[in-house]
Amino acid sequence: MNLLHATGIAKRYGGLAALSDVELSVGEGEFIAVIGPNGAGKSTLLNVLTGLVLPDEGRVLLEGSDMTRAATHKRVRAGLGRTFQHGRPFARLSVLENVMAGAAIQSGRGEAELRKRAMAVLDQMGLAADAQAAIGSLSYGHRRMVEMCRALACEPRVLLLDEPAAGLNSAEVDQLADRLADLRAKHRLAIVLIEHNMGMVMRLAQRIVVLNFGCKIAEGPPSEIQRDPAVLSAYLGEGHDHARV
């Protein structure tokens, strides 16, 4: 059974169809990338999956339970995690406190348990040494990692990542890719990645979903997507180096 299954998803804003009959399925431990040009509907799809935007049509199932109209916090408690393209860490809190705030979404935990859970995640992601640091003292790349730690502290079974490599240097991108590969391999965490860094996508993704103008135009393993004429035309356009896809 799929952990996450969205079917027939449609979302319109006036006369604009942001999503049209989009389907996405995610199995346990699966790594899926969603790619497409700007305005293709990628972030809208993640917003529908997490309940920030309600679809006009379609259903969202999480482990078989209908979450189409469920509140975001209920989806998070049920196992759906999310980071955002433009993250918003709590500026007045330490790194540890930011991650504890994520762990607190699961009710019934005292402060000691929250702290233990948060430290475990920070250690796993290589940030334990920064636990007491102020968010503002960290590099941009480390702040993005803290946001991911906060999402992981919610104990998701499916993690949705919206352009986590944006603004990172090449060393930080490599480190991020290593961490994501470890999460999937060691914890069977399912990951859905929206990303423009095609090197990272091709390294990590088992399956790629391609959106264009709100429609799914292709889906398959990286080797197929690299050669798909519709993808090359829609995503790169004429005159680009097709070998990058």
Image (spheres, rainbow, N blue to C red):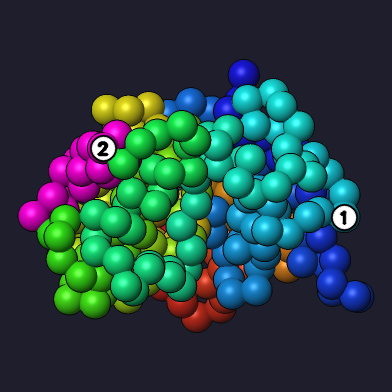
Please identify the quarter of the rendering in which residue 184 is found.
Answer: top left
Residue 14's spot in the image, x, y percent? Answer: 90, 75
Q: Residue at x 77, y 66 (%)?
A: 18
**Nearest the eye: 42 or 231:** 42
Q: Residue at x 58, y 71 (%)?
A: 37
Q: Separation of disc 1 and disc 2 at Cα?
A: 43 Å
* Residue 225 visible, this angle: no
Residue type, label 1? Asp
Image quadrant in which the C terminus is located: bottom left
* Residue 94 visible, this angle: yes
**Nearest the eye: 158 or 27:** 158
Choose the circle earlier in sequence order: 1 or 2: 1
> Are the residues tagged 1 and 2 within 8 Å (C-beta)?
no
| Mark 2 surroundings: few (<14), some (14-19) or many (≥20) residues within 10 A | few
Instruction: Return the residue at label 1.
Output: 56
Residue 99's spot in the image, x, y percent? Answer: 32, 52
Question: What is the chief secondary structure element of the magenta stretch?
Answer: helix
Residue 207's spot in the image, x, y percent? Answer: 50, 40
Disc 2 secondary structure class: helix
Residue furthest to the right in view is: 15
Vertical placement of 89 versus 75: above or below? below
Residue furthest to the top in view is: 1
Magenta segment:
112-129
Q: Which mark is residue 112?
A: 2
Instruction: Tell me: 163 left or right of 97.
Output: right
**Nearest the eye: 54 or 197:** 54
